[in-house]
Amino acid sequence: MAEAYSLDELMVVEASRHISDWDTVMVGTGLPMVASLFALKNHAPNMCYVVETGGIAPEILGTPSSVTDARVMYRAVRHGSLLDALGGVLQRGLADVAFLGGAQIDQFANVNSTVIGDYNSPKVRFPGSGGANDLASHAKKVLIITRHEKRRFPERCDFITSPGYIDGPDGRKRAGLTSPYPDIFVITDLAVMAIDKSTGRLRVEALMPEVSLERVKENTGFELPDGDTEPVEPPTEAELRLLREEVDPGGEYLKTPE
Amino acid sequence: MTRKASNKVMTAQEAVKRFVHDGATVGMGGQSIGRCAMAVTHEIVRQGIKDLTLVGCNLSMSMDILVGAGLAKRTECGTGNLERFGTTFRWRKAIEDRTLEVEDYSHLAMASRFLAGSLGLPFMPSKSMLGTDILNKQIANGSDAFRVIDNPWDLDEPVVLLPACKPDVSIIHAQKADQMGNIIIEGFTTQEPEMVKASSSVIVSCEELISSDEVRRHPDRTTVPYIFVDAVVVQPWGSFPTSTYGHYEHDPEHLRRYQACARPGGEAYEEYLREFIYECENFDEHLDRAISSARREELRASMQKLL
């Protein structure tokens, strides 16, 4: 039987559930943008969308391909600068939620978007931090949407571009970060992992439909503790309709089921 | 030095000859696929100005071309990429081959360095990058760019100090300028307001030359006043194939064409540089080769729908 929803749709709807009404959310493009727009249209009508490039509370049009795309600037209340958004909103402490991506995420939810291999003689060089380090340093809640593959979840990142809990429960506090104990959620096609604040490590909080904890462990490069998990509620028909008809009508971002 | 209110309109050729020199630190305007100073970049490539240090927050296609043409020795930035259109392949290859020096920052860190420069301050504090390898590995490498001190008013609080970034010259593309060099940027402004004010010289290319009377009628719209600006190059489509907000959208076709050459490098890339830069006398000739007038109309119409 064909699935009623795709894995991308499942991840996006689940991610959106971590956004509350009235949140200020810093978003780029791609799946985080879709999740944020979905939240805005579904349950967070008073959410404030902030774009790194300085757009405050725009109405997003269609399917932007960049944070410089005019589609992320439509009817904004202000067009500003990087300094306005990353300094004046984010470092200032006004971002409730921020989205990150990266090549590697380790057991402390540190993220690498700089290099695979040694920094001084890289095997593969990635684009670098961009605003990601700033988002991970200052936001009160961090959401990461990614495919669940073992190589993406090593014990330790080759390079820590953006801080999770660094090396333990008080790692951020010791480092001097102003948001020392943020919530961090990693939403994958297999599970939702969350930081356990008593250990500073990721644990499986919820499982995607029909996924076992064993399967998550097999696909994760670091050790995950046993413990209670909740099932992730699959998207409802109404949620899928909103997603497909209003949020991503062209299917530009989200694959629908085969 | 405060620049005078003289007529600063000149060709890209003259502006680059006068203000961009071998070994210069160049502030790169634009971000990703938006408002990169492509016309001025092409002119730097044609004039073969080398040993450049390229600085900015996100460095994109303009940086990749200068690296690919062998003219850059170093970058200081937050990211190199074109978002959905992929990474900056010549930059990535140069780092992997260790032929390019890089210093990594976050976007806010670079913006803060330009802010320090624009305020005449030697450094700016930051609360980003703490606890990460952006600090730890670069400090271990002997970089002098990052200092972690205690907040003098709260000795339990570490703060990062970042040195001011003051480019020798910044190159940016704006929607409007007048002949005195007053600049109006519409839409997002990236790090450009601070970067431009921190720079010793500034070249701005613009879509539209407006009168100084018009500037004076709406002085609140001026992003950067003429006292910071040295050269005004009137160049419609000067950010092509990246977009200029309010004027035209980015051109996915040409962006993909560039990326298809930049990714493999070698002969394909040399051919791109030859066809689209070296063999062109100026940027208008590049545009004639790269985009039809019908396509230009489409990109303009498509931007109009988004305003």
Image (tube, rainbow, N blue to C red):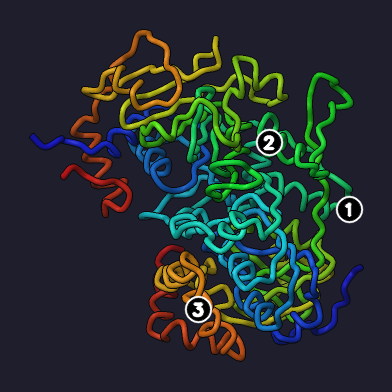
| Chain letter of the residue carrying label 1 | B
| Rendered-image quadrant of the N terminus of chain A | top left
Q: Where in the figure is residue A24, as x and y percent of width and height?
A: 53, 34
Q: CA distance from mark 3 to mark 2?
A: 38 Å
| Rendered-image quadrant of the C terminus of chain A | top left
Residue named by callout 1? B120
Q: Which mark is residue B272?
A: 3
Mark closest to the chain's N terminus, 3 or 2: 2
- Relative to A251, say whether A6 is above or below: above
What is the three-letter code of the residue carrying label 3? Tyr
Q: CA distance from mark 3 to mark 1?
A: 41 Å
Furthest-right residue in this view: B1
Image point 42% across, 86% down: which residue?
Answer: B293
The foreground one among B297 and B162 is: B162
Image point 38% across, 17% down: which residue?
Answer: A205
Residue named by callout 2? B129
